[in-house]
Image (cartoon, rainbow, N blue to C red):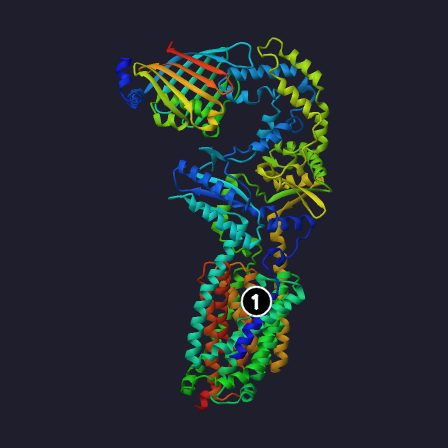
Amino acid sequence: MAAESSTRRPEGAIDELMQMLARVPESSASFAEVKVIAMLTRPLHATGRLLYRRPAHLEKVTLEPQPERLVVDGNRLTLTEANETPRIIDLDAEPAIRALVDAIRGTLSGDLAALRRSYAVTMEGGVSDWRLTLTPSDPGVARLVTRTTIAGAGTALRLVQTTQANGDEIRMTIGPAP
Amino acid sequence: MAALAGAALLTGLVFSHVEIHTDMTDFLPQGRSDAARLMLQELRSGVATSLVMLGIEGSPPDALARISRDVTNALDRSGQFAFVSNGADRLLGSAEQQLLFSHRYLLSSVTTPEAFTVPALHDDMQRLLRGLQSSAAPLVQQFGSADPPGAFLAIARDWRGISKMRSVHGVWFAPERDRALILARTHAGGLDIAGQDAVTAAIRQAFTDAEPGNARLLAIGPAIFAREAAHAMRSDVETLSIASVILAAALLLWRFRSPWMLGIIAVPVMLGIAAGALVVQLAFGFVHGVAVGFGMTMLGVTVDYPVLLVGHRKQGEAAPATLRRIGQAFTLSVITAALGLTGMLFSGFPGLSQLGCFSVVGVLVAASVTRWLLPRLIVAADLAPVAAEDPARLLRVERLRAWRVWGVGACAVAGAGLLAMGGPRLQSELAALSPVPSAALAVDAELRGELGAPDAMSIALVRNKDADSVLRAEEELLPVFDALIAQGVLGGVEIAARYLPSAATQLARRSDLPAPDVLATRVVMAQEGLPFREGTFRPFIDDVAASRTMAPLLASGIIGGLIAERLRPLIFQRGRDWYGVIAPSDLRQPERFAAAMRAAGATYLDVTAEANGIVAEYTNSAWRWVGLGALAALVAIAAGLREPRRVVRVVGAIAGAVLMTIAVLTAAGVRLSLIHIVSLQFVAGVGLDYALFFARRQLDVEERARTLRTLVTCNAMTLLTFGLLAVCRTPLLRQIGITVVIGALAAFVFAFLFAGQRPRATAEFA
């Protein structure tokens, strides 16, 4: 399988993957997130649910340890933490957050153009077991993020791992919906 | 020929030596109070006038963002701008952000003794931890270890302020439409026309170079308006002058069959203008562009003088013979016109005084030249109208005077109509004198709103000896504003002290900061039980330590960039004093705001009302003085004609024309402004010529025919030239054109009907 796909043009594989992903109208999953932050002595853990609906709706609902609801709709990001009033962020005004959103939403929607707006994209493996490496091409984004890796099998995402420029790491493992 | 060249040379010489001002400040009267004077000065020539706002629209958002970037970079490189921003620097540029960040513990109200205690710091750290846990971690991390109390974020929130702009593809967009916005300030002042020409060229070039495709550029700003208005007016005037010269020339050639006639007319007119400008320069120290512009309109009267002279000359006649026939009417007409214009001289309205002076001198000089220099030239060039035609035709025309009673009736109807309409309505808004089309003003208001540029027309002012005292005075008012906002009187205030606390406040905050070792111990204690690594808050401890010896940030220390742009209109020095502007937003109860400001010792100013009040006051006084001028003219006519019946006829013709013009304008919904005062004076001037020439006594048929045809020529010239004005783009010129066309036509008809001899006698003998 791997040998077979490696003989193909890499563009062919990535296009095939993207077309597959683009056909998914809606998906939901559970996630477990681990943040390794330099200023902290221990990693931060969080768990919750993910929901995606074509083409531009993405929800990340954190249940533990600190309830939070993050909804991205088009260019608008709404972050509701616990009992606080929702924070609305215009993604165009916050390139760092936009890049993080683009990485996940671009992949889920199979929108290679959106991914390439902020990143250089490379793919390893075949469509049944793939790994995309996103390296920021925009200097503004590169100041914050060194690399984002997204791995999956077919249309199911399994891992989103972001290495920040300051060395901090966010690793999100994705599993089937509870 | 030599005379013509000489006159042209002299005019050129005068205009290359007089100092022409175009600043409306010099033309308009000063305000009634110090504060009003200051604000009017600011409105006309202050910081606000070098503001340029650009909007780019008509393409997809990504294209607009790219154009916005390209244009901004090009403008920045052009060297014409003190400041250009399209929002790509995210409201605060890095240098400015650094300045605010380093001074955060002096500038932010977050700084209190309590903020640096162990419990407070512990709470801050817990909040930070929650932030790191949340999805907002990337934002929180940015300043987390250097500023756990959040002083900088509080400042940044204040600075983001009132603008409603969106950020699209990283640049400013209008809140409700796809329009990229750029804010800039020119080095050149708003009244520096040459400088603004260069600015406009730079903007056009930058936009063209950005390959805009379908996108449109909106360039708005006081300076651009002034420049565009001047250009539109100039191009109007150029096109119209050429057209009207051709038309008038054709008319004169047809009438007098000699190209010399044009030169003969040009000599007195040019000398009149030159003399007028020269005397104004000597008397006032400078000549205002508007006075020259309007003055030339008034001197249109003098174009008739040579025509009257030549038109009455018999073929081959020596000059003194012609002068003997028309001398008295001519002299009386000139003296009366000059007296009528004298009123403006004493109006107290600087621009009107200049205009009066210019016109009086111009009329007298042009008349003198016509009287004493032209006769020789005319005889030399043998200028005279083509031979008179059939006198019977004249008589038929004169029989029309039997309809005189209808003329009186028309005047009565006009008068009654005017009374029924409640008299003429006077224009008292400053905007009416502005040559800027109202459509452009609407775009201006729209862009201002979108950019959050201050355009408060109701403001309060505090004044003090230096910037810091102004800031202190404003700080004392902060509780007052908070109360007013709580009571719903207004939505908020734009005030310098919100952004920049006074030195005293900054020093007080500085003294609240704990010593480095104290803070270090407290941070360690506050960290207890939280998973922060040792040394995480070192930057915080170091920055607080540095703040303890930091000098307060003063207004003078903020140069360039968006911060300075925000502060400059709010706090500035004029003369020896410093002023702070308090600009309310969403003002719902102006009178309560005004009362609160007066009670607190600040000066309240309704800028629009103030400006309009001044204009109204002086416009009224201008009308009074014009009335007095008319009275003087009346006395002159009475003294010159010495025959009550003829006086009544002459004055009736002019009064009828003026009344008719005002009635027609009022019926059309026009409010009478300075422009109409000027135009009506002109109407009265030509009307005087018509009436006095028609009213001459003991004329034979031939001379009456000459008079009629000469006056028809004069009237046709006036109608042609001013008729063209009535169709031009500049509203101001259009108003002049319409008024003069109505007035001159009415003046001619009434002068013919009222002032001329009744046809009865001639008709009986015929």
Is residue B254 toward the left or the right of residue B85 in the image?
left
Q: Nearer the viewer, residue B327 or A136?
A: A136
Q: Residues within 10 Å of mark 1 (few under 14, many from 20)?
A: many
Instruction: Give percent across and percent down for residue B234.
Output: 49, 60
Q: Nearer the viewer, residue B366 or B608?
A: B366
In this rendering, the answer to whether B505 lies above or below B306 is above
Instruction: Give percent across and percent down for residue B87.
Output: 51, 36
Give the structural element (helix, strand or loop) at label 1: helix
Q: Residue furthest bottom?
A: B765
Question: Label 1 amino acid?
Answer: Gly
Query: Which residue is at 58% across, 12% downward?
Result: B532
- Please count the marks in the image: 1
Dividing the picture into quarters, in which one does residue A176 lie?
A: top left
Dividing the picture into quarters, in which one does residue B591 lie?
A: top right
Residue B609 visible in rendering: yes
Q: Which residue is mark 1?
A: B295
Q: Nearer the viewer, residue B160 or B321?
A: B160
Q: Quadrant of the C terminus of chain B?
A: bottom left
In this rendering, the answer to whether B121 lies above or below B414 is above
Q: Nearer the viewer, residue B267 or B362?
A: B267
Instruction: Give percent across and percent down for residue B199.
Output: 52, 49
In this rendering, the answer to whether B233 lies above or below B629 is above
Query: Which residue is at 50% across, 44% downward?
Result: B75
Q: Chain of mark 1?
A: B
Residue B653 visible in rendering: no
Instruction: Give percent across and percent down for residue B217.
Output: 44, 45
